[in-house]
Image: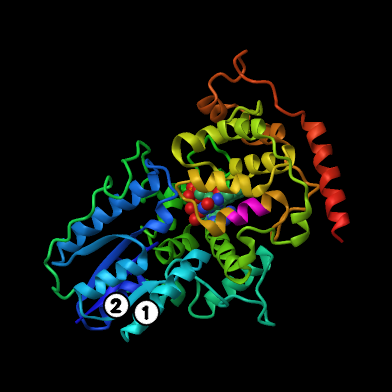
Amino acid sequence: MVNVFWFRRDLRLEDNAGLYHALHAGLPVQCIFIFDKNIIAELKEDDPRISFIYEQLKSLQEQLKAKSSSIKVLYGNPQQAFKTVLKDYKVHGVYTNHDFEPYAKIRDDQVARLLRKSDIQLHTFKDHVIFEKSEVVKSDGLPYTVFTPYKRKWLEVLNSNGEGSKSKYFRSFPSIKFNNYNKTKHRMPSLKKIGFVPTKISFPSKTVSQNIIKSYDKNRDYPALNGTSKLGIHFRFGTISIREKARKAILLNETYLSELIWRDFYAQIMYHFPHVVGSAFRAKYDKIPWRDNKKEFKAWCEGKTGYPLVDAGMRELNATGHMHNRVRMVTASFLTKHLLMDWRKGEAYFAEKLLDFDLASNNGGWQWASGSGTDAAPYFRIFNPSSQLKKFDKDLIYVKQWVPEYGTEAYPEPIVDHKEARERCLATYKAALNDAL
Ligand SMILES: Cc1cc2nc3c(=O)[nH]c(=O)nc-3n(C[C@H](O)[C@H](O)[C@H](O)COP(=O)(O)OP(=O)(O)OC[C@H]3O[C@@H](n4cnc5c(N)ncnc54)[C@H](O)[C@@H]3O)c2cc1C
């Protein structure tokens, strides 16, 4: 008899809540991972995130081997995969960590139902965030929709159980020995077998110099500086522990901690307001008559808008799978305000390209930029891409890195005039929002 631990967005052995509970339950533990056909069938064959997951699984396999254990990697529909697991093992319980994305909730319900038929329980745990569900809500029990009071309450709840880095919410789960269950070498299906080829993109390290975090508040807004952690992909796939990083952040840099709180904020928004996936948080913003100009959208995607900061950002994204946060804001604002195109189009493009793509944070960022989201700046505040450039890359170091032809004849003319685009945006938003009242 075994307990099964199902890895998903938590690809690490240390400080993993669900794995800790599985090992703590006494029985031998068999780890599994499922390459879910429903998700990966839609991805391009060289999607770097699949290569990333694959590398992490190989590393987990090695680490588990050293503990005389193993991970079984399956490929297919999760319910089908569990039928195979139930054939191969006498399973007592299945352990895993929460995932509140809409598809994940349906998948987990279906798997739980399947397991129940065999009297097996699906045990799930919080691991991906510091606070989830309704752990941080207003005094009347309603969820926060504005960041600053959310953050205040977040810190209050954190400190209610030990001050600062000593808070119990930051505590790591202790390591528990694997009891030598399974020495069978489970062969992983090859990347090719699941329909992918290795990526050429390289991944940011999960070790970050303390100086970057210590100077985060001073440097984070300048894309030419190496001023942010680039840990997004590791937070996304759980190759690092949020508890460990937040515990360090509170000691090193309050602004950095704030960014981690934004991550919790958007996760709880998606949990409490699942309609944000696909619709505007504020319904009336769905009345905006978005333009659909394929040529302009293509120019935006390729970084050929004639606005250097926008173009540098898009080219960085296309080449590396990363884009600096300041530039994400500028490019998203440009698409939704200057080009007046539906934020969902930009959201989908980022989802396809970002190594750190996370449904809740990406959706939050896009709705913020278009003005339709929680806590968004009022629609009449429109980023001026040229002043943003002067402020945040005045020496054109970032721009020259990604747009080497900037300043030459080869660089395109702006596809829209800033002043005209701004006025068109204000008029369109105003009319649509007034009509919707
Ligand atoms: C339009 C748009 C789309 C975005 N899409 C995503 C996305 O798909 N996935 C994603 O993780 N972040 C997203 N962000 C937030 C932010 O841009 C990235 O988290 C950050 O740039 C990642 O770089 P980093 O790892 O160096 O972050 P750092 O600046 O070093 O921050 C550390 C971590 O804090 C979290 N974080 C930072 N800023 C935010 C934020 N505003 N909202 C939520 N979490 C944050 C991330 O996990 C990040 O890795 C988006 C922002 C915008 C404006």
Residue 254 seen from this side: no
Q: Say which of 376 and 156 sits in front.
A: 376
Tell me residue 357's x, y (percent).
Answer: 49, 51
* Magenta residues, start to end: 363-367
Q: How far apart are marks 1 and 2 (CA)?
A: 11 Å
Q: Which mark is residue 22?
A: 2
Q: In which quarter of the image is residue 168?
A: bottom left
Q: Decide if residue 362 is on the left or right side of residue 119.
A: right
Q: Say which of 216 and 140 sits in front.
A: 140
Q: Decide if residue 369 is on the left or right side of residue 168.
A: right
Tell me residue 115's x, y (percent).
Answer: 34, 79
- Spot the residue most to the bottom: 119
> What color scheme is it?
rainbow
Q: Kindly check if marks 1 and 2 are in contact, taking CB atoms under 8 A apart as contact.
A: no
Name the element at disc 1.
Answer: strand
Tell me residue 102's x, y (percent).
Answer: 53, 66
Query: Which quadrant, please, contains the C terminus?
Result: bottom right
Q: Residue type at mark 1?
A: Leu
Q: Decide if residue 319 is on the left or right side of residue 151.
A: left
Q: Is 414 located above or below residue 300 in the figure?
A: above
Query: Which quadrant, please, contains the N terminus?
Result: bottom left
Q: Say which of 229 and 309 sits in front.
A: 309
Name the residue rendered at 49%, 43% in the picture.
353
Q: Is 284 located above or below residue 271 in the figure?
A: above
Name the residue rendered at 72%, 55% in the picture.
372
Q: Which residue is under mark 1?
A: 122
Name the element at disc 2.
Answer: helix
Tell me residue 314's x, y (percent).
Answer: 56, 35
Q: Is 407 located above or below residue 151 in the figure?
A: above
Question: Is residue 437 in the magenta section?
Answer: no
Q: Say which of 326 and 331 sits in front.
A: 331
